[in-house]
Image (cartoon, coloured by chain):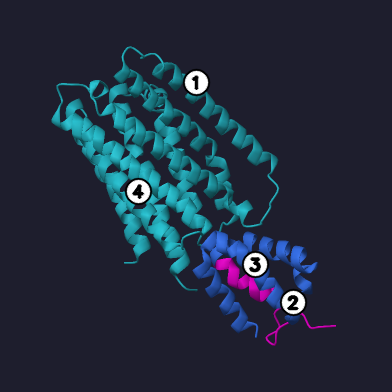
Chain colours: A blue, B cyan
Amino acid sequence: MASTTTPDGRTYSQVVEQRLTPLLGPFTARMALKTFASSRLGRTPDQISRGDVPALLDALRPMLNTLVGSARASSVIDELKKELA
Amino acid sequence: MTRTRIAIAVTAALAAAHLAAVMAFLDDPARVRQVHDLGGWAASIFGAFGAVVAARTFAPGEYLRKVWGLLAAGAVLLVAGHAVRSVWVNTTPEIGFEDSVLIYPRLLLVTAANTGTTWGLVLLAYSYAHSGLNVPRTAAFNALWAAVSALALVLMVVQLQKESADFTSPRHVAGALTGMVSTLADTADLILIAPVLRVAYLMRGGRLSVVWWVVGISEVLWLVYDCRVWLAHSFPVDPAHALAIIYVVRNPALAFPGLAGILHREAVTTQG
């Protein structure tokens, strides 16, 4: 089974949540992860593995486009891609 | 000083200067009217500026571009509507504005401004759901929304009764229609207070939430402004004085969308 934790011991979902929280707040960051992990991947946030990250970030993009605009959305997604590479 | 702090300071300074000037001329109704006129100019220009800044932050076709484009259009048209009235009142004081030919273009400006602003507010309130997030509404929220909506509807009925009383000439009809359009848009905007503040609450703790808070508070201030005649009679001071002071809330109500626009730009352009 694929690992759900990064080399520093955090889960992949925690890394994404921590990146979204300063912008969206903790509740909406958690809600976004839960919503899109479930709808796109059919999983809970805790079950997200490294292989799921690209699909999860793709799923988050339209939500970010709506709330922060495409430029900021791209920069958040790019930062997450680098962090989780 | 960051742009955020500058924008907050400008908004506070506009309201404080308006209030101080009203207090200074409280016994001189003509001067108080001039102060309100000047305060309205400054606040509405700042409101339009910030909304335009926000609209230009987002690319054409983006959801937020539509939201802020509509709010900006509404704010700019409100400045134009204010200008039409202000120019007439200050250059032709012997003839009331309700008897001026400018009442017709102002009707068009006010209608367009209110349509843009209300549509923009609907999109802003709908932004959370549009993003794909769905949080069920609580019973407490529904109760608050129903209470505010009921108050908005009562205000609408009272105001429409007053405005429909003057259909004595074509110009007075245009004046009455201007008031009715504003009243209907105000009602829609007040009904949107709870949904806008709900988005702010759901994003509490995040940089974006302040945008929805400020727009929501702006609408709350409009609610206070719309209740000003009732409120003025509930204070233990001369109702004319109380009315002059309560009227000052129009200043931050006009300026806050501009502040929200600048804060939105700062929230999405600041890294980290």
- Residue B222 at x, y percent in the picture: 42, 36
Q: Residue at horizontal 44%, vertical 70%? A: B270
Residue that label 4 marks: B47
* Badge 3 and badge 1 both on one subunit: no
Residue type at mark 4 is Gly
Residue type at mark 1 is Val
Q: Residue at horizontal 61%, vertical 72%? A: A18
- Residue B6 at x, y percent in the picture: 32, 60
Residue type at mark 3 is Leu
Residue that label 1 marks: B157
Residue range of the region highlighted in magenta in the rendering: A1-22
Q: Residue at horizontal 47%, vertical 73%? A: B271
State the CA–CA distance, disc 2 to disc 3.
Answer: 12 Å
Above or below residue B240? Residue B111 is: below
State the CA–CA distance, disc 3 to disc 1.
Answer: 44 Å
- Residues at badges 4 and 2 in contact (C-beta under 8 Å)? no
